[in-house]
Image (spheres, rainbow, N blue to C red):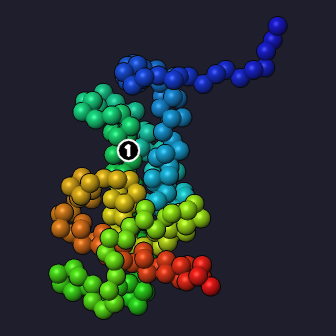
Amino acid sequence: MYSSTQPSPPGPFDEKTLLAKLRNGDADGFEYLVRTWCSRLLAVARRMLANEEDAQDCVQEAFLQAFRKINEFQERSALGTWLHRILVNAALMKLRSRQRQAVELDENLLPQFDESGHRVGKSANPRSSAEELAVRQEVREQVREKIALLPDAYRLVLVLRDIEGYDTAEAARILEITEVVLKVRLHRARAALKKLLEPLWKEELL
C-alpha cells in the first residue's frame, strides 16, 4: 500500500560516525550537519553582520567551505567548534569585502576616552556586558537590536567575547588584532552599548 509519509531525516549520528560519512561524501551526513548547525550558525552570522541577506550568504559559504575542507579537519577540537570558526572567518571576510563606508555612531553618543583607554567624563561601570544587561527575553531582543547599531569593530569584539564566549587570546587571533587592542575595543563597545540602552532603562522606570 502506498504511503504518503515523508522519509525520516537522517541521524542522529555521533561525531565519529558523522565524520566518516562526511569524509566519504555521504549525502545523509551532509544533510544532518546542515540540519543540526544551520540555525545556530545563522544566529551568529546575524549578530556579526547585522544584515539578514549577508548572514544567510555567510552561512551557506561556511557550509561549502566545511564540505570542501572536511578532510583537513584534524579533530583537535569538536566538529561544531571547527564549523563555528569557519563561520566567524567567513563573516569577517564578508565584512572586509563590503565596499561601503562604515556607519559611524554620533560622536555625542559614544563615550570619550583618553590615550590609555580610560573613559573621560561621567564614570561608568566598564564591566557591564551584554549578558548582564540581557536579563529577560524582551531585554535580550533590545540588546541585539542595539548591538546591530555599533560600528563593525566594536560589534565584532562584543559578539565574540560577550556572546559567543571566545577568550581574549582566541578572539584577538580571529580578528587579527593584539589583545591590548581587543581589550580597549571591548571596553568601548560595552560603554557604547550601555549608552545606547540607557533610554530604554529610563522608559521602564517611568
The amino acid type of the residue labelled 1 equals His
Q: Residues within 10 Å of mark 1 (few under 14, many from 20)?
A: many
In the picture as drawn, the residue positioned furthest to the top comes out as 1
**Mark 1 lies on residue:** 84
Residue 151 image point, x, y percent = 39, 73
- SS assignment at label 1: helix
Name the foreground residue: 67 vs 203. Answer: 203
Residue 175 image point, x, y percent = 27, 59
* 112 horizontally vs 145: left or right: left
In the picture as drawn, the residue positioned furthest to the right comes out as 1
* 124 horizontally vs 58: left or right: left
Residue 37 image point, x, y percent = 48, 39
- Say above or below: 174 vs 194: above
- Say above or below: 150 vs 93: below
Residue 141 image point, x, y percent = 56, 64
Can residue 176 be seen here? The reply is: yes
Q: Quadrant of residue 186?
A: bottom left
Task: Say which quadrant the C terminus sits in.
Answer: bottom right
Q: Quadrant of residue 48?
A: bottom left
Q: Residue at x 42, y 38 (%)?
A: 64
Q: Residue at x 37, y 60 (%)?
A: 162
Q: Residue at x 53, y 22 (%)?
A: 11
Can residue 144 be seen here? The reply is: no
